[in-house]
Image (cartoon, helix red, strand yellow):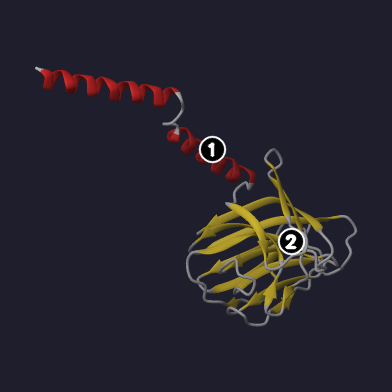
């Protein structure tokens, strides 16, 4: 009989401890998990159709992203000395993808700019390393537009310049291992504006938009609107 009373009292004590713990918030772990989930959703919303953003390479001034959900436009501020030779420095807004991809956007720089070779790009990139292999459709502040690419990690950047200056709309396409740039003028009709270059990227890779000021002491801004990202 005494043993049964002891067991009952122990169970009662455990129940009282559990009740006190709930009241004091000691078992609030599920709430914290929900907070993390909410934060992740907010971050995704802030990046629109992309997953995240950040600076690639060494930049003196951190870049930023402003996403206007109503206009579905992305205002990117980026610093960085260059996107050339064997390494890059710029602000990149990205999404991980696989397979064939098409990325299209209207691009407009904000302000007069300091260096005519500030760049706003549509990019497909192997990694977030500064010397990663990549291909991009790059619009320069001067209006020069080119397909830039680094065939393998640490290699020198190369380019194919287009004969269209300051196009209304830009597109980069990945078909298998081949990358090409397409441009549209006021009519809206796209034309192939470069030869194709072959870069063997492993899946998944990064697809996105970015800005480089081409001056490590400066931050430049560009607006990307009517952005379309399609996977074949």
First in sequence: mark 2 or mark 1?
A: 1
The answer to whether residue 187 is seen in the rendering is no
Q: CA distance from mark 2 to mark 1?
A: 28 Å
Task: From the image, tell me which residue sits under label 2.
Answer: 211
Residue at left offset 62%, top offset 80%: 154
Q: Nearer the viewer, residue 115 or 123?
A: 115
The N terminus sits in image quarter? top left
Q: Position of residue 94 (x, y in %)?
A: 61, 57
Q: Residue 88, located in which quarter of the rendered image?
A: bottom right
For residue 3, above or below residue 197: above
Q: Residue furthest front?
A: 2
In this view, the residue in front, 225 or 118, is 118
Q: Label 1: how many residues lie within 10 Å, few (<14), some (14-19) or many (20+)? A: few
For the image shown, how many numbered marks are present on the structure? Answer: 2
Q: Which label is found at residue 99?
A: none
Q: Secondary structure at mark 2?
A: strand
Check the image and report above or below for 67 versus 216: above
Toward which corner of the image does residue 71 lie, by quadrant? top right
Residue at x 49%, y 36% (from the top left corner) = 32
Q: Which of 173 and 206 lies nearest the eye of the viewer? A: 206
Label 2 neighbourhood size at 10 Å, few (<14), some (14-19), many (20+)?
Answer: many
Q: Residue 201's spot in the image, x, y percent?
A: 52, 72
- Give the residue drawn at x 87%, y 67%: 115
Q: Position of residue 34 (x, y in %)?
A: 48, 36
Mark 1 secondary-structure assignment: helix
């Amino acid at each position: 009989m005494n043993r049964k009373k002891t067991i009952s009292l122990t169970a009662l004590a455990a129940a009282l401890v559990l009740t006190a713990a709930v009241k004091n918030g000691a078992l609030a772990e599920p709430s914290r998990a929900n907070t993390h989930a909410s934060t992740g959703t907010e971050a995704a919303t802030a990046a629109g159709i992309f997953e995240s953003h950040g600076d690639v390479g060494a930049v003196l001034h951190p870049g930023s992203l402003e996403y206007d959900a109503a206009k579905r436009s992305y205002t990117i501020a980026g610093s960085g000395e260059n996107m050339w030779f064997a390494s890059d420095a710029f602000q990149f807004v990205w999404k991980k993808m696989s397979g064939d991809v098409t990325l299209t956007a209207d691009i407009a720089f904000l302000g007069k700019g300091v260096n005519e070779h500030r760049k706003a790009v549509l990019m497909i990139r192997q990694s977030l390393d500064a010397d990663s292999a990549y291909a991009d459709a790059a619009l320069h502040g001067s209006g020069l537009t080119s397909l830039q690419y680094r065939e393998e990690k640490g290699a020198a950047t190369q380019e194919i310049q287009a004969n269209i200056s300051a196009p209304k709309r830009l597109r980069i396409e990945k078909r298998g291992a081949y990358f090409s740039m397409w441009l549209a003028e006021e009519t809206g009709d796209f034309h192939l504006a470069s030869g194709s270059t072959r870069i063997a990227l492993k899946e998944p890779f990064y697809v996105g938009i970015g800005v480089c000021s081409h001056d490590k002491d400066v931050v430049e801004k560009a607006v990307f609107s009517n952005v379309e990202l399609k996977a074949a």
